[in-house]
Amino acid sequence: MKLIIQIPCYNEEQTIKAVIKDLPEKISGVDEMEILVIDDGSTDNTAELAKSFGARVVSHKKNLGLAASFKTGIRHALLSGADIIVNTDGDNQYYGGDIESLIKPILENKADMVIGARDIKNHKEFSPLKKLLQSIGSHIVKIISGADVIDAPSGFRAFSKTCASSINVFDNFSYTMETIIQSSAKGFRIVSVPVRVNEKLRKSRLFKNMFQYIFRSGCTIIRMFAIYRPFRFFTLFALTFILSGISILVRYLYFFFNNDGSGHLQSLLLAAILIIIGFLLQVIAIFADLISINRKLLEDIQSKINKI
């Protein structure tokens, strides 16, 4: 059983030593372990330091972002024969000693993806607003994906080889929300396990402020919902328009049968427009569902090619 721990990094020369030293040297059930650092176009000595601490380094020529680094790591880990892939951050946020409990459900064949869930309520580094938003976001992802998600934005997670080979990350911002919704839609088992965190060494560079993070994460969730639940996604919009049109139509009929319909023709027109838009959206839902079937077939072919 080969485990590869991938660490996406961008200018992490101040923290990379702590991250690697925090990783366990031996794990029960693992025969071979390798550390893979993805240097995302760093301009400091991140790559050189990582190599000096025993890690294998794959470098981007320029900074491509966290999602691209994650994809590069997954691809190289699979090519290196990984049976389990663990992803952790280069800022030393997550406690490396919890990797053993993180991969345990996969070793026991109880899960395909395991998400390290931080104790958000008692997290000293999180403000009350951030704790609330993290909780709301995780709950939304849980509803959409149907997966056991406690800490959806957590980057500390483990993947089985089969799950990792089926992942396609479309978003350029992050991979956390997308991989949950996508993997759940493909039938992979997702569980959460509690993990600890280390003291904060630097501020997050993933987003400038909380509002940018909310906007980008929200866009990702909506996009993944449309891609992997297209019939449900467009049907919700269709029902909204149809029900709104029907309610306005009922209002018009009420006034009409009470001999006051002549002045409410605009309501009849609006009702007709809304109902027509609703039916058109429902047609789109049907076509989107047919397209999603083709996507699933292509992803099955991709998965088989990756296994070969």
Image: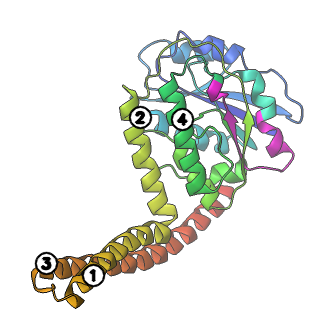
Residue 258 visible to the viewer: yes
The residue under label 2 is: 213
Res. 134 mark: 4
Separation (CA) of disc 2 from disc 3? 42 Å
At horizontal 73% and vertical 20% (from top left) the residue drawn is 23
Amino acid at dot 1:
Leu
Quadrant location, the N terminus: top right
| Mark 2 in CB contact with mark 3 (< 8 angstroms) | no
Q: Name which of mark 3 and mark 4 comes first in the sequence.
A: 4
| Mark 3 in CB contact with mark 4 (< 8 angstroms) | no
| Mark 1 in CB contact with mark 4 (< 8 angstroms) | no
At horizontal 65% and vertical 48% (from top left) the residue drawn is 164
Amino acid at dot 4:
Gln
Res. 283 mark: none
Q: Residues within 10 Å of mark 1 (few under 14, many from 20)?
A: some
Q: Which residues are magenta?
A: 102-121
Q: Residues within 10 Å of mark 4 (few under 14, many from 20)?
A: many
Q: Picture coordinates of residue 210 (x, y %)?
A: 40, 29
Quadrant location, the C terminus: bottom right
Q: In the orientation shown, which residue stands out farthest toward the right?
A: 28
Quadrant in the picture for residue 201: top right
Helix, strand or loop under label 1: helix
